[in-house]
Image: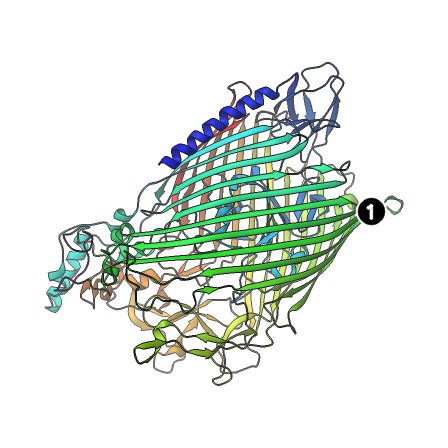
C-alpha cells in the first residue's frame, strides 16, 4: 500500500512540475485549427512546425493547436500522414487555420519493414502496419493483444485469463511440427526471444503497450526473408514512440478496470450429487459413498473466483531540449486476476533520444527502456480442483490442514489421490515471480560525404532479463504436510547481444525515370541463458526435501547467429517495383558442416493505377504484387542436437551403493547431420482503393512449403540410443487466401463511420513423415490427454492436418443418445481394436476472421471489434474425464463432482477415445466496445478526454466447454483459467 501512495504522490508532484514547466516555455503564440478538406472535421495529431527550426506542436482532439514562441515572418509547415503538406507564411497573424487535402489515402505513409522503412505505395511484400490509433482498445496488459482481430492471417490466442498472461501467435498457420511456430518479434530493430523466463511466463508483458507507436506484421517470405533463419513463421516489428521537435508536450493517462468471470462450468450442485449417490446406494446395496456425503451445497467456483480490480497509469513527455528531440515515459500497472491471490504489477520507464549532428549528416537514435514485473501467480490447478471437489462438503473444518476441509483417512491423514480443497491451494501457497528487463540500443546513421546517397549504419543493442521465482507452500498444506511445507528459490538470466553494421546506398536516376537502393549488412547476435537451480526445503527452510537436489546447480546454454545480407530495391517509372535479397545465416545449433543456410527472396509489384487508370479519379490505388522467398528455422529449444552427448538420469532413477544414491549417465540420441528446416513461400496479392479510398483492401493467395521438418519421430530399435530421434524428416504444405476490406460509408464534417473486416482461409497438409517409405506406417501418435495411462488423442499422418484426432466412431441409439462403449467396427473384423480408429477433424481453423467499426460524432467516438474462427474442433478432455459415474464415486474412496452432462448420458465409465468428445469449436468473440468523449480545454491549455469500455463482451459458439478459444496446438481442452469480462474507465490529459 505504501508503494502505491508513494507512486501517486510522485505522479502528483510530476504533474505540478510539468504544468509549471509548460507555462514557463509559453511565449507569443500562434493558434488555429487544422481540418480535413473532405469533410471539415479536425485533424487529430497533425504536426505544425516552424520551417527551418525545431519548434513544433501537435493538434489536439479537435484539430486545434497552439504554437508558442513563433517569430514574426516565420513560415509554418502543416503536415499529417496521408495528407498533402502546406506551408503558410505567418506575417503578423496570431490565428491561422488550414485545410489539408488527402494524399492518396495512406499511400505516402511510411511503414516500418525489415532494416528500414518504405512508403506504403512502394511495398512489394505482404506487410500490414497497424498504428496506435487503430490498436485494440480497453484493458490491454500485453503488447501482442493490441493486434487482436486487426490483421488478416494473424491468430492471437491467449492462454487464459491470468493477470499479465501471454498469447500464442500464428501468422498464416503453422509451418512446423516440433520446432517453434511463433513469429519473430523485433523491438526497435532488436530481434528478441519471445519465450519466458523464471519469474515471467510472458516477456512481452514487459513492453508497456502505451509506449508503442506502431506494429508491422511481415507475412510473406519476400518481406520476412531479410531475417532469414528466424523468419519462417513471419515477423512482428514493434516500433516504440520517439521524440519530436518543438516545445515539450506532456500526456498523462490513467485507467481503472474491474474484471468479472464471464462464464462458469456447469457442474452438479450438492443436492444433485446426494440424489445420485443415494440412488446408486439403493441400486447396488453399497452404502460406502452414501456414508461419505455431506450436507452442504458449496459452489467451489464461487469460492476461488472474485471481481478483479486494476489500474494503469502512464506519464510521458515529448519535445526537444537543447535542440535534441526526446520522449520520456514512466508507467505503473497493477492488475488483479479473477482467480484469488493472482496479481500482476509492472513498473516501466523509457527514454528515446534522436538528435542529428554535422548539418544533419549524422542521425543518432538512442532507445532505452526498463521494466520490472512482479507477479503473485495463483495455482492454476485450483480451477480443476474446484470442478472436482465434492459440493456436499464445507469449505472449512477443524483440522491440522490450516482449517480447510480436506479428504482424510480414518487416522486423519490426507488422501493424496483424492481431490484438494481449491481455496487452500490458493491461500496456503505464495508463488512470487519477478523479472527485470533492460532493452536498449544505439543506432548511428552517417551520410558519407564523399559519395552522395551513401550511408554507414550501425546498431548496437542489449536485451538483458533477470528473473526470480520464490515458491512457498505452508507447512499446513495437505499435499505438503509430510515434508513440513515447501520452499524453493530459483533464478534465471538471459542476455541477448546484437551488433549490426551496414552500408546503404540510394540513387534517383531521373534520366531513365528510375531509382534504386542497396543494403549490405553484417549481423552478429549472441544468446546466453544463465540458470541457477536450488534444492527444495521445508517451509521453514530447515530441512531439504529428499530427491529435490538438482543434478547441476548451474547451467549456461548459449547459441550464436552470424549473418550477412544483401538487398536491392528498384523502381522504374514509379510503376514497376522489384525487390531482391539474399541472406546467409550460420547458427551454432548445427554442426560446422550444416550450420550455414542461404535464404533468397524476390518480389515484384506493378502499379496498375498508374498504368491503366491514371485518369480515372474513382480508382485511387491498384497494385499487383508477386513474391517468392525462402526462410529458415532453428528455434527448436535444443542447443546441441548434432553432438554425441550423455544425459543424466533423474533423481527417481538413481542407483544405491551403500548409503549413497548416484545418478547415472546414458548416451542421448543425436543426428550429426541435422540441418535447417526451410520454408519456401509464394504469394500473389492485389491491393486496391476506390472512390478516394473510401473502399480499400487486399486480396492475396499464399502457399508455404516446408521441407526437412525438424521433428521427433520414432526410429527402429537399436539404430540409436532412444526409440525417438529429433531429426529432419518430412514435409508440410500450408496454403490459403486472405481478403481485407475497409470502407468509409459516411464522411461528413460532424460524423464519420468506418467499418472493416478481414478473413483468412488456410489448409495445412503433412506430405511426408519418413525418410524411407514404410507401408505399415500410419502416423505418429501425439496429443497426450488426461485420463488413463499414456493415452493420446491425435496423430501426425500423411495427407492430414497436424494433430488430426484419432478416435473411435461413436454409435447412438434411435433417439440420438450415445451408447456407452459401443463403436463402429470400421474394418468389419468383428472386434473393436486400434485398427477401428479413424482420423476425424482437427484443432486448427479453416477460417480466421476479424471485424471492426468506429463512429465519430462531434466530440464523441465509439468503436467495437471482434474476431472468430470457423472449422476448428476441440477434444473436450474435461467432459471425457468428469461426466461419468466412476468420477463421482472415486475408487480411492472419495466423492468427486461431475458435469451436468452426466445427467443426460449416464455413462458409468470413461470413454476417452470416443469421437463423442470432439466438438465443433467455431466461435465469434466481440473483443471490445469502447466509448470516448473529448471534454476540451481544462486547466488552461490542458485538454481532457474520457473513455469507457468493455473487453470480452460476449462469445457466440456451440462448444459446450468453458471457452472455444484454445491456445494449445493439440486441441486438447482441459480446464483453463477463464478469460474475464473487463469493464474499464479512463482519463487522458494532454498539456
Considering only vertical position in the picture, is 254 above or below 269? above
Asked if residue 774 is positioned above or below residue 951 in the image, the reply reads below
Residue 850 in magenta stretch: no
- Residue 285 in the image: x percent, y percent? 10, 68
Residue drawn where x is 62% and y is 47% of the image: 441
Query: With 306 as the anchor, is 82 left or right in this view?
Result: right
Q: With respect to residue 548, does 660 lie above or below?
A: below
User: Which residues lie in the magenta part?
Assistant: 398-413
Residue 815 visible? The answer is no
- Seen from the viewer's position, the closer of residues 947 and 340 is 340
Q: Residue furthest right?
A: 511
The way the protein has been coloured in the rendering is rainbow
With 116 as the anchor, is 751 left or right in this view?
left
Residue 144, image x and y in percent? 52, 48
Secondary structure of residue under mark 1: strand
* Residue labelled with disc 1: 507
In the shown orientation, is residue 417 left or right of residue 726? left
Residue in front for this viewpoint, 650 or 724 = 650
Q: Position of residue 457 (x, y in %)?
A: 72, 49
Amino acid at each position: 500500500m505504501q508503494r502505491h501512495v508513494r507512486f501517486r504522490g510522485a505522479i502528483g508532484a510530476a504533474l505540478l512540475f510539468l504544468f509549471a514547466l509548460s507555462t514557463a516555455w509559453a511565449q507569443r503564440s500562434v493558434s488555429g485549427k487544422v481540418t480535413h478538406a473532405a469533410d471539415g472535421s479536425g485533424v487529430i495529431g497533425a504536426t505544425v512546425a516552424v520551417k527551418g527550426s525545431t519548434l513544433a506542436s501537435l493538434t489536439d482532439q479537435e484539430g486545434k493547436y497552439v504554437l508558442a514562441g513563433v517569430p514574426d515572418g516565420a513560415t509554418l509547415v502543416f503536415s499529417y500522414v496521408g495528407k498533402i503538406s502546406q506551408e503558410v507564411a505567418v506575417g503578423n497573424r496570431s490565428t491561422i487555420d488550414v485545410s489539408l487535402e488527402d494524399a492518396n489515402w495512406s499511400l505516402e505513409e511510411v511503414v516500418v519493414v525489415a532494416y528500414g522503412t518504405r512508403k506504403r505505395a512502394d511495398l512489394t511484400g505482404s506487410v500490414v502496419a497497424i498504428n496506435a490509433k487503430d490498436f485494440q482498445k480497453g484493458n490491454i496488459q500485453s503488447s501482442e493483444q493490441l493486434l487482436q482481430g486487426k490483421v488478416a492471417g494473424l491468430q492471437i490466442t491467449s492462454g487464459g485469463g491470468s493477470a499479465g498472461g501471454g498469447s500464442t501467435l500464428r501468422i498464416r498457420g503453422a509451418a512446423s511440427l516440433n520446432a517453434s511456430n511463433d513469429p519473430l518479434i523485433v523491438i526497435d530493430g532488436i530481434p528478441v526471444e519471445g519465450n519466458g523466463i523464471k519469474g515471467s511466463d510472458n516477456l512481452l508483458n514487459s513492453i508497456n503497450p502505451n509506449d508503442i507507436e506502431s506494429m508491422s506484421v511481415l507475412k510473406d517470405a519476400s518481406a520476412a526473408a531479410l531475417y532469414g533463419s528466424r523468419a519462417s513463421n513471419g515477423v512482428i516489428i514493434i516500433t516504440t514512440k520517439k521524440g519530436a521537435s518543438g516545445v515539450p508536450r506532456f500526456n498523462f493517462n490513467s485507467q481503472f478496470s474491474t474484471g468479472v468471470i464471464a462464464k462458469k462450468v456447469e457442474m452438479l450442485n450438492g443436492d444433485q450429487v446426494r440424489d445420485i449417490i443415494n440412488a446408486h446406494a439403493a441400486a447396488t446395496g453399497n452404502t460406502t459413498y452414501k456414508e461419505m456425503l455431506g450436507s452442504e451445497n458449496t459452489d467451489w467456483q464461487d469460492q476461488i473466483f472474485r471481481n478483479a480490480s486494476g489500474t494503469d497509469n502512464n506519464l510521458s513527455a515529448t519535445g526537444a531540449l537543447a535542440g535534441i528531440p526526446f520522449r520520456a515515459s514512466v508507467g505503473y500497472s497493477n492488475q488483479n486476476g479473477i482467480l484469488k491471490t493472482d496479481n500482476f504489477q509492472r513498473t516501466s520507464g523509457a527514454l528515446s533520444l534522436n538528435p542529428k549532428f554535422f548539418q544533419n549528416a549524422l542521425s543518432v537514435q538512442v532507445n532505452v527502456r526498463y521494466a520490472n514485473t512482479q507477479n503473485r501467480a495463483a495455482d492454476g490447478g485450483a480451477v480443476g480442483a474446484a470442478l472436482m471437489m465434492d459440493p456436499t462438503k464445507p469449505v472449512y473444518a477443524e483440522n491440522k490442514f490450516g482449517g480447510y476441509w480436506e479428504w482424510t483417512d480414518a487416522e486423519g491423514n490426507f488422501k493424496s489421490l483424492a481431490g484438494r480443497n481449491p481455496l487452500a491451494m490458493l491461500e496456503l501457497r505464495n508463488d512470487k515471480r519477478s523479472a527485470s528487463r533492460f532493452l536498449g540500443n544505439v543506432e548511428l546513421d552517417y551520410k558519407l560525404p564523399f559519395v552522395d546517397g551513401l550511408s554507414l549504419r550501425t546498431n548496437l543493442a542489449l536485451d538483458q532479463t533477470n528473473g526470480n521465482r520464490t515458491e512457498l507452500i505452508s507447512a499446513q498444506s495437505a499435499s505438503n504436510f509430510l515434508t513440513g511445507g515447501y520452499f524453493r528459490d530459483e533464478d534465471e538470466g538471459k542476455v541477448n547481444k546484437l551488433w549490426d553494421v551496414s552500408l546503404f546506398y540510394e540513387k534517383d536516376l531521373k534520366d531513365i525515370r528510375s531509382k534504386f537502393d542497396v543494403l549490405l549488412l553484417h549481423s552478429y547476435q549472441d544468446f546466453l541463458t544463465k540458470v541457477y537451480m536450488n534444492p527444495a526445503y521445508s517451509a521453514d527452510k530447515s530441512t531439504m526435501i529428499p530427491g529435490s537436489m538438482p543434478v547441476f546447480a548451474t547451467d549456461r546454454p548459449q547459441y550464436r547467429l552470424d549473418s550477412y545480407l544483401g538487398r536491392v530495391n528498384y523502381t522504374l517509372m514509379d510503376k514497376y517495383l522489384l525487390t531482391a535479397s539474399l541472406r546467409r545465416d550460420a547458427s551454432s545449433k548445427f554442426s560446422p558442416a550444416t550450420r550455414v543456410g542461404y535464404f533468397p527472396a524476390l518480389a515484384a509489384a506493378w502499379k496498375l493505377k498508374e498504368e491503366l487508370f491514371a485518369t480515372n479519379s474513382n480508382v485511387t490505388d491498384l497494385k499487383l504484387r508477386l513474391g517468392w522467398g525462402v526462410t529458415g528455422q532453428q528455434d527448436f529449444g535444443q542447443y546441441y542436437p548434432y553432438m554425441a552427448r550423455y544425459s543424466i538420469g533423474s533423481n527417481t532413477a538413481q542407483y544405491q551403493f551403500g548409503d549413497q544414491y548416484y545418478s547415472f549417465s546414458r548416451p542421448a540420441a543425436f543426428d550429426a547431420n541435422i540441418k535447417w528446416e526451410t520454408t519456401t513461400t509464394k504469394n500473389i496479392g492485389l491491393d486496391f482503393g476506390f472512390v478516394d479510398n473510401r473502399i480499400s483492401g487486399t486480396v492475396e493467395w499464399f502457399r508455404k512449403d516446408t521441407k526437412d521438418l525438424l521433428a521427433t519421430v520414432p526410429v527402429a530399435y537399436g539404430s540409436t540410443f532412444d526409440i525417438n530421434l529429433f531429426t529432419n524428416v518430412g514435409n508440410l504444405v500450408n496454403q490459403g487466401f486472405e481478403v481485407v476490406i475497409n470502407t468509409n460509408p459516411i464522411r461528413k464534417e460532424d460524423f464519420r463511420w468506418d467499418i472493416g473486416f478481414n478473413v483468412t482461409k488456410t489448409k495445412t497438409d503433412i506430405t511426408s513423415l519418413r525418410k524411407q517409405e514404410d507401408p505399415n506406417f500410419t502416423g505418429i501418435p501425439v496429443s497426450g490427454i488426461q485420463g488413463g495411462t499414456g493415452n493420446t488423442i491425435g496423430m501426425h499422418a500423411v495427407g492430414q492436418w497436424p494433430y488430426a484426432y484419432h478416435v473411435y466412431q461413436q454409435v447412438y441409439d434411435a433417439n440420438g443418445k450415445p451408447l456407452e462403449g459401443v463403436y463402429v467396427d470400421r474394418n468389419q473384423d468383428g472386434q473393436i481394436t486400434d485398427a477401428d480408429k479413424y482420423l476425424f477433424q482437427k484443432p486448427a481453423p479453416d477460417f480466421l476472421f476479424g471485424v471492426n467499426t468506429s463512429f465519430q460524432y462531434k466530440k464523441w467516438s465509439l468503436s467495437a471489434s471482434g474476431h472468430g474462427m470457423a472449422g476448428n474442433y476441440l477434444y473436450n478432455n474435461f467432459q471425457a474425464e468428469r461426466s461419468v459415474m466412476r468420477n463421482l464415486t472415486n475408487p480411492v474412496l472419495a466423492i468427486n463432482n461431475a458435469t451436468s452432462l452426466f445427467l443426460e448420458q449416464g455413462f458409468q465409465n470413461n470413454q476417452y477415445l470416443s469421437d463423442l468428445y470432439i466438438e465443433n469449436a467455431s466461435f465469434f468473440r466481440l473483443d471490445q466496445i469502447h466509448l470516448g468523449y473529448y471534454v476540451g480545454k481544462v486547466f488552461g491549455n490542458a485538454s481532457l478526454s474520457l473513455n469507457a469500455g468493455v473487453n470480452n463482451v460476449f462469445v457466440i459458439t456451440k462448444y459446450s466447454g468453458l471457452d472455444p478459444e484454445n491456445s494449445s496446438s493439440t486441441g486438447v481442452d482441459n480446464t483453463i483459467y477463464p478469460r474475464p469480462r473487463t469493464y474499464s474507465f479512463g482519463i487522458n490529459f494532454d498539456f
